[in-house]
Amino acid sequence: MSHLFEGRGNCKVLCGVQGILAQLALMFVAAMCLALKRHYERPKRSARIWLMDVSKQAFSAGVAHLSGMVWAIIISSHTAVEGSQCAWYLLVFFVDTTIGVTVALALHKCFVKLACDRSHTGKCDASGDDSTFVAALKVTTESVSRCGEYGDPPSALIWLPQMIEWTLCTLVGRIFSGGLVAVAAPLFAALASGMDTLFTSDIAELWTVMVLGPLSMNLVQVVVQDAVLKWNSRRAESSDCFDGHGSDMEDFASPYSRLLGA
């Protein structure tokens, strides 16, 4: 199995301290971008709501990052293609930023619409405490359908289904992007190999691929995702998704509390 981690080039996505520092730098810049956006947004979200919104991106970004590295290692290890792991990581990242994010957002919209429809029709309604599973399913449905709303006061039990749903959407988008690049690897091979020739140092290529390259794409990506994942009060006022079903999200969290023994 060790040959899967060798690749064809010299730059590797997992290369000790430099690799870790580069990835931490990318995370820091993305977080600063979101913090700057929050500073100028009006109306401004509370710190707790903002942290809940951002944490959904943090979890999904971590999963997507690991998926991207796995794809880069697998593709670069194939004997029929050229290019280092770093070059293939950047290619997968680029495809994910353009196509994968579109897939993730479309899937997210479908999940929210489905949850909204089920809540509106009462298909997840649970009378009494007869079925804890059905009650918990209702909590999940209501939570996903009200993306960015966490109750008053904000509850982690309402945030959790939203985080899982968005992470799943992001993972599907990254898997789709990586698979697309893998299938078309012979077509991208010359481009990947060409990227490697631009650098005389593996460390320079690593930092370019992990920080400078994704930076410009991440600046757009995290802002777009944040706009989608946060709760828009105007959207809440114009939505009839919850007519007759109430809007007090803290009431929906009680089945989860029972499941956790709270």
Image: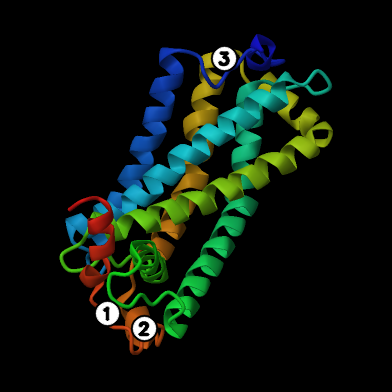
Q: Amino acid at mark 2?
A: Phe
Q: CA distance from mark 1 to mark 2?
A: 7 Å
How crowded is the residue under tag 3: few (<14 C-alpha within 10 Å), some, or many (20+)? Answer: some
At mark 1, the secondary structure is loop
Q: CA distance from mark 3 to mark 1?
A: 54 Å
The reply to whether discs 1 and 2 touch (Cβ–Cβ < 8 Å) is yes
**Mark 3 against mark 1, which lies toward the viewer?**
1
Q: Position of residue 4 (x, y in %)?
A: 67, 17
Residue identified by numbered label 1: 247
Q: Position of residue 140 (x, y in %)?
A: 38, 63
Seen at 60% across and 16% down, the residue is 11
With 102 as the anchor, is 57 left or right in this view? Answer: left
Quadrant of the rendered image containing residue 239: bottom left
Quadrant of the rendered image containing residue 161: bottom left
Residue identified by numbered label 3: 202
At mark 2, the secondary structure is loop
Quadrant of the rendered image containing residue 106: bottom right
With 250 as the anchor, is 66 left or right in this view? Answer: right
Seen at 45% across and 57% down, the residue is 225
Can residue 149 be seen in the rendering of this structure? yes
Residue identified by numbered label 2: 242
Q: Position of residue 141 (x, y in %)?
A: 41, 68
How crowded is the residue under tag 1: few (<14 C-alpha within 10 Å), some, or many (20+)? Answer: some
Between residue 125 and residue 160, name the one nearer to us: 125
